[in-house]
Image (tube, grey):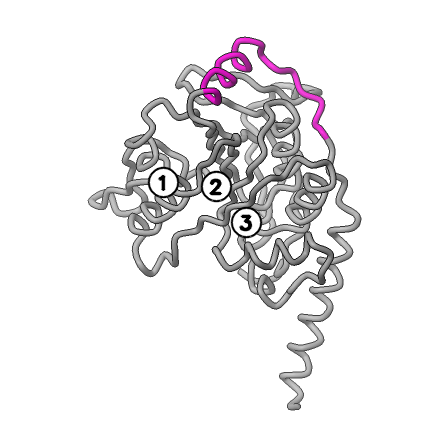
Amino acid sequence: MKGYEKIITRSVERGRRTFIEGISTVSIEEIPTEFDELAVERLNDSLERNNLFIVGEMHGVKENVNVIYTLFKKFGFRQLALEWEPELKDVAEKFLSGGELNFNAIKNSSDGRVTAGHFALMRKLKSEGMLAGLVCFDGGSDGEGWNARDAAMAKNILNSLSEVPTLVVAGNFHTKTEVFHLNDESIEQHPMGENIKKEIPDVAIGKIEYLTGQYHNFGTNDFVKLGNKKLPERARFYKGTKGLYTFEIPNAHAAIVPNPHER
């Protein structure tokens, strides 16, 4: 083996050990949260009709998995849908059945979608009898076109719906329910949320809001704190003026990802 290949192999092995250790050390627990009673009532009503709640996140936040766990406990979700490539479902299920984690399948992931916390979360949900199904709904590469990818993600989610309540977690651009524009104002972006809303007009949509802290998305980045307002001590769950259910996190921390140094 050439010197360069040895360096790469050792680097991957170090990453694997760090990630596996991270799974065992991440604490999955409910977040002390102030739940607005009316928001809880309305979301429960929506879940009785549709069994679906879509939440937008910033990838790579340590607290995201605890938000998911808190929502599972509060609203009785039993199926988790993640913005992961479909082949990672087998990786996760083998891990949950007691097998080793196939680190090679995730070793290049550095955008924060896959974290050590996700595997710790799934293991805890399964041990507590709360995970009846896992869906990995990513629709393909961005090279196929943003709109095509989001349309495929929406289709994958709709095809996965069952009689158990499903919590869908995706990047916050994908969960938008209206057309928007990115860098090129001439190109309309049709997000996953818009596609799902065409089929389920009253689907419940939410977001995680981070008041300050850090996240890992192709490197560690800072959330910009808005103003000098004192941060609340507890998380909050409420329904905002635009109709979005909001889980507000006072302070975020960067998650453990498989490939933290790739940009």
Near-viewer residue (101 or 209): 101
Q: Position of residue 134 (x, y in %)?
A: 55, 45
Amino acid identity at mark 1:
Met
Near-viewer residue (34 or 71): 71
Q: Which residue is mark 1?
A: 192
Quadrant location of residue 242? top left
Q: Which mark is residue 84?
A: none
Task: State if disc 2 and disc 3 touch (CB < 8 Å).
Answer: no
Near-viewer residue (257 or 252): 257
What distance separates the C-alpha of mark 1 from that of mark 3? 16 Å
Under tag 3, what secondary structure?
loop
Q: Residue at x 48, y 14 (%)?
A: 42
Q: Which residue is mark 3?
A: 113
Magenta region's main secondary structure? helix
Q: Position of residue 49 (x, y in %)?
A: 43, 21
Q: Residue at x 60, y 50 (%)?
A: 220
Q: Position of residue 244 (x, y in %)?
A: 44, 22
Amino acid identity at mark 3:
Arg
Q: Residue at x 59, y 48 (%)?
A: 216
Near-viewer residue (248 or 47): 47
Position of 55 with respect to 10 (left or right) is left
Q: Which mark is residue 170?
A: 2
Task: State if disc 2 and disc 1 touch (CB < 8 Å).
Answer: yes
Of the 4 image quadrants, the one containing the N terminus is bottom right
**Badge 1: few (under 14), some or many (20 or more) residues near its Cα, within 10 Å?**
many
Among the two numbered marks 1 and 2 on one chain, the one whose residue lies closer to the N terminus: 2
State the extent of the magenta-drawn residues as a range.
30-48
